[in-house]
Amino acid sequence: MDKKEIVLSGIRATGNLHLGNYFGALSKFVRMQEDYDSMYFIADLHALTTNPDPQQLHCNVKNIIAEYLAAGLDPEKSTLFVQSDVPEVSELYLLLNMHVGIGELMRTASFKDKARKQLGIKTDNDNDGEIEKEIIGSDSNKRVNAGLLTYPTLMAVDILIQKAHKVPVGKDQEQHLELTRRFARRFNSFYGVELFPEPTNFDFGGAPIKVPGLDGSGKMGKSEGNCIYLIDDEKTLRKKVMRAVTDEGPKVPNQPVSQPVQNLFTLMELTSAPDVVQHFRDAYADCSIRYGDLKKQLAEDILKITLPIRERILEIQNDDAYMGRVVRLGAEKARERASKTLREAREIMGIRKFY
Ligand code: TRP
């Protein structure tokens, strides 16, 4: 039996992977597959919460598989699978929901955010009353679906069904992980069992990496339209970087760096050699910097990372048979663990056969 700790993480199938996903998650997944019993999957059921176009959803799943592989995840070292290929997840989701409170789900930050958006409630004061009234109100009952509410149950099941110990996720998922621990504890203590281990976030050591976007604020994210995708071609990528938001340039020596320009420096620190970064820092400090030069260099250095990945993505996308083999093998491994846990959970809860 494999004694290595189980690491598991998933990514929602909502679009192509960008540099934020790459530095924040993928590149770490690649390193972790050497030392852990690692499982990475594509969360297509979670993507359903926003009712995507079916054809588009299917394409997204395939694209992400190709991108996972192209970025260096190795099906010989990790278990790579598609969430919906493990039907045991859906059944345990039903079972676990019997121990999850509607209230705690409604108080989850991600739910409140999404519900607020879908209901068109502007204020993000803690106006829970308003969300609840709108949701229960008769004319808005289809706008916020039950799948969105129970998103954390499904995520908890992804983790618990594999009895994963470590779950590398970003800050935005920490509350979901906390709920996972709570559900695990509750289930164990309700039935007096030790079925589910409590998973912890994976601590990579050092400061968490935040990959900024090109639009001057915040972080790189699919919804922000400020992204560099791994699949971007050379021309697109250069154009995006050259158009990145900056400012009017430093007027006095050693002037503090504005957020948009700091973002470019941060991207540079992730992608360029230290002496290159220092060169532009110095140029900023003595006011000789030309943002056009910085952007050209930045685009060049990003391309060195992304172009080889892009080429592999295109190759893998053309090989349906290979992708098929990878996810079939992954599903087999994932189902082996999942079906064992599900069997145990059913037995514990009293869902037993007569025959
Ligand atoms: N909710 C995660 C996200 O949006 C994706 C996800 C689904 C996940 N199930 C998971 C992450 C299990 C880690 C473990 O990013």
Image: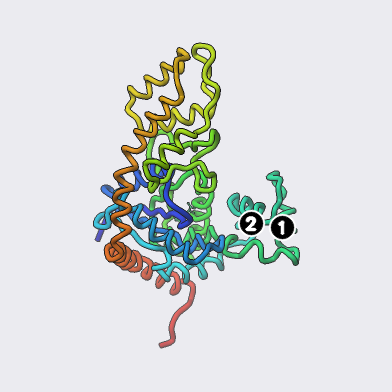
Q: Is residue 126 left or right of residue 304?
A: right
Q: Is residue 333 visible?
A: no
Q: Which residue is painted at 52% across and 17% down in the image?
A: 250
Residue 9: x and y, percent? Answer: 40, 53
Q: Residues within 10 Å of mark 1 (few under 14, many from 20)?
A: few
Residue 249: percent from the left, percent from the top?
52, 20
Residue density around tag 2, few if under 14, some if 14–19, many if 20 or more, within 10 Å: some
Q: Which mark is residue 132?
A: 1
Q: State the residue at coordinates (56%, 60%).
A: 50
- Specify the farthest residue to the front: 235
Which element type, helix, strand or loop, lies under badge 2? Answer: helix
Colour scheme in use = rainbow
Residue shown at 38% from the left, 48% from the top: 231
The kind of residue on which mark 2 rests is Met
Residue 106: mark: 2
Q: What SS does tag 1 mark?
A: helix
The CA distance from mark 2 to mark 1 is 8 Å
Name the residue nearer the viewer: 134 or 14: 14
In the image, taking residue 277 as reference, residue 285 lies left or right, namely: right
Above or below — where is 302 with respect to 137?
above
Quadrant in which residue 62 is drawn: bottom left
Residues tagged 2 and 1 counted as in contact (Cβ below 8 A): yes
Q: Quadrant of the N terminus?
A: bottom left
